[in-house]
Amino acid sequence: MWSVCRRPLRQPATQLKPEAAMRRSYQILLVLLGIVAVLAALVAANRKFGVPARGQDYVLRLALPPAGAAMDLPQVEGPPDASRPLVVIDAGHGGHDPGASAGEIQEKALTLALALAVRDELLQAGGIRVALTRSDDRYLLLAERSGIARRLKADLLLSIHADSTEEGGEASGATVYTLSEQGSSETARRMAERENRSDSINGIALEDTSDAVSAILVDLSQRETQARSKEMAWLILREARGRMRFRPIPLQSAAFIVLKSPDVPSVLYETGYISNAGDVARLVDPDGRRIFAEATARAIRAFFARQLRY
């Protein structure tokens, strides 16, 4: 009689003992941790040694004032009498914003030198108070520049710049800009909105008026301010023509943000083309700078004389 020998059944190949399964889990975990560690090391190395892209800094950090913080106002120089007229002179650009450049000459340094020259010329003759939006190499937002003039209750804002072109240095000469009609209407609409009701126009608080009245007040104030701004631009041309070179159409208008104050006459003075060797030579030369300062100071005095401020 045949005897049957029963052998124990083998476990399926895919089934592992508990000890083997635990070892396999540890191995997988170690592999994943290794991948995470490599990625973390790559990120850290890239932050520390990464090459800036296209010549730009890897991270640009700007020191901004806390939200809602009051902006420091510049010193007012000249007569201590507050009834004397006040002109705010704004040197364009500054800080990390160099403006246009020609070799080692940067617009921000050129405009500051011209602003200081006009200030000194005015203070030397007396009778007019002067404040600079910046007296060193610092950055200001465009709205801050006109905001300084409004907070100081200035009688005039003069913003000094130097133009630039890519036309091979062919363009030359100065240009005086006032606010365009389009920019004026945009300002009127914006300031009449309810969220801007904390502003006042010529001493009248907009928060105490209706939307329609606010729009009318802003528009009327802007029209008067624009007329006085154009008068200042014409006086600059009158005093400097024959002593400085101007473009064929020297008086122009544009919607520059710095000109959009509704109650401070504002003029932007493009003193010449920094891309033009002749203009740059004139603006950096002490005699050329003196001529610019004298003509501009005379125009400012004539403007205030016409306003019967003193």
Image (cartoon, rainbow, N blue to C red):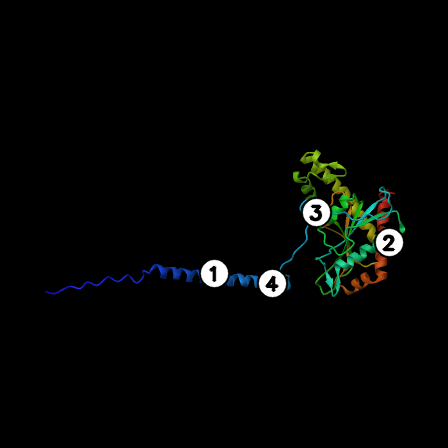
What amino acid does circle 3 point to? Gly
Left or right of 123 in this view: 190: left
Q: Tag 1 or tag 4, which sits nearer the N-term? A: 1
Q: Tag 1 or tag 2, which sits nearer the N-term? A: 1
Q: Nearer the viewer, mark 3 or mark 4?
A: 4
Asked whether 43 or 290 is in front, the reply is 43
What amino acid does circle 2 point to? Glu
The residue that disc 2 covers is 121
SS class of the residue under badge 2?
helix
SS class of the residue under badge 1?
helix
- The answer for how far apart the CA atoms under marks 3 and 1 are is 60 Å
- The answer for how far apart the CA atoms under marks 4 and 1 are is 23 Å
User: Which numbered marker is on residue 33?
Assistant: 1
The residue that disc 4 covers is 48
Q: Tag 4 or tag 3, which sits nearer the N-term? A: 4
In the figure, 198 relative to 167: above or below? above
Give the farthest residue toward the right.
125
Where does residue 113 sit, x and y in percent of width and height? Answer: 80, 58
What amino acid does circle 4 point to? Lys
Left or right of 165 in this view: 116: right
Q: Nearer the viewer, mark 4 or mark 1?
A: 1
- The answer for how far apart the CA atoms under marks 2 and 4 are is 50 Å
